[in-house]
Image (tube, coloured by chain):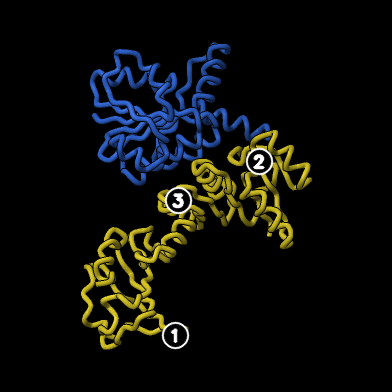
Chain colours: A yellow, B blue
Amino acid sequence: MNIIVVGGGNVGYYLVKDLKAAGHSVILMEKDRQRAARLYEDLGDLVRQGDGCESRTMQDLGIGQCDLVVAATGEDEDNLIVCQMALECFGVKRTIARVNSPANEALFTELGITTTVSSTRIIFNLIEQEIETDHIVPLAALARGNLEVVSVELSDHSKMVGRSIGEITLPADAHIVAILRGDKGMLPSPKAILQAGDVVLTLVKTDRESELHHVFDGH
Amino acid sequence: MRIVIIGCGRVGSTVARLLSATHDVTIVDRTSDSFRRLGTSFKGKRLVGPATDMDVLRKAGVEGADAFIAVTDGDNRNIMASQMAKRVFNVPTVLTRVYDPVRASVFQKHGIHVLCTTSMAAGFFRDIIEGNACDTFSEQLQAYLDESVQKA
């Protein structure tokens, strides 16, 4: 693939090295002259100095022939405009944006940038998974962030253990969609009895997620 | 009217002072130092924080505001904050200052009033030198873009 990466910070640098090693044709754009010069010494020809939002610079790079633009700067505002310009002004089909503030993911989606990556959210989710007392882990945001799928692993102490799905009262706008037991997945039939170690996948409106804690917490 | 202004530079502080006598104005800037420009006649509220942060915008009262004016020194910051005001908070009137004429023309189509002071100043100067009547802003932006297309 022909890929342009905008932003030569640590994320852009290591991404470009890996993409190149994987056989892609890559260009790395860095706005800052000094940083671009340093990157050039290391990575050579594939580094270009310039502003990824500047139409002339991007046309000179042949952005029209590019398959994918990755906006990987440390500023959400720059990543948003890089992607919007690529999609609307240069006819690039696919863009990926790094989103630093997780709150901006929904905004980016609303504005047409469908693929976003937020390291802040990834790290946050990992920490949530580590915390013993809070087993509710968001897995995926749907419908522009209004709905989410959360996963709950039932501990030995959970008051759900030994009860059937039909007995459980969930908050409004929440539905159990699947039970994972070992390497098997089960549909949530009302008669199924929950066991310790089961992972319960629940679809819930994002603003009601906190209410699930009362349902799944220990005694 | 409730008006939120982001960026307390020369333009931001001036428009804030002009409007604060008769409107409910909140001005947002990254540093409190910039608020010195407001002087003593400014009657509105001041708020420190990044203008592209949802929580900061909410705190500034963008929800339910009648107008939003983006005049920070960053084109991208102005465009992003304006799109948040328009698309997330449904502010009816959104005004944005953008220096780059190409970006100005792209985001003009998004229901945001984009003022490109670069092409405006260049167009006015040309009109005065050539002794012509001054064009409207949109004609100047268009002329600037046409010329850059011809050159490219």
The label on residue B8 is none
**Which amino acid, by three-letter code, is at mark 3?**
Phe
x, y percentage for residue B110? 42, 42
Residue at the location (53% across, 37% down)?
B103
Q: Choose the circle earlier in sequence order: 1 or 2.
A: 2
Q: Dividing the picture into quarters, in which one does residue B57 lie? A: top left
Q: Give B18 or B147, whichever is nearer the viewer.
A: B18
**Which amino acid, by three-letter code, is at mark 1?**
Lys
Residue at the location (23% across, 29% down)?
B1
Q: Give A200 or A99, whichever is nearer the viewer.
A: A200
Q: Nearer the viewer, mark 2 or mark 3?
A: 2
Chain of the residue where label 2 is placed in the rendered structure: A
Question: Answer yes or no: do the residues labelled 1 and 3 have beta carbons within 8 Å?
Answer: no
Q: Give B121 or A12, whichever is nearer the viewer.
A: A12
From this view, report whether residue B114 is shown above or below residue A119.
above
Which residue carries the number 2 mark?
A30
Chain of the residue where label 1 is placed in the rendered structure: A
Which residue carries the number 1 mark?
A184
From this view, report whether residue A36 is shown above or below residue A197.
above
**Which amino acid, by three-letter code, is at mark 2?**
Glu
x, y percentage for residue B31? 43, 27
x, y percentage for residue A81? 52, 43
Chain of the residue where label 3 is placed in the rendered structure: A
Circle 2 Cα neighbour tier, 10 Å, few/some/many (<14 / 14–19 / ≥20)? many
Which residue carries the number 3 mark?
A108
Mark 1 residue element:
strand
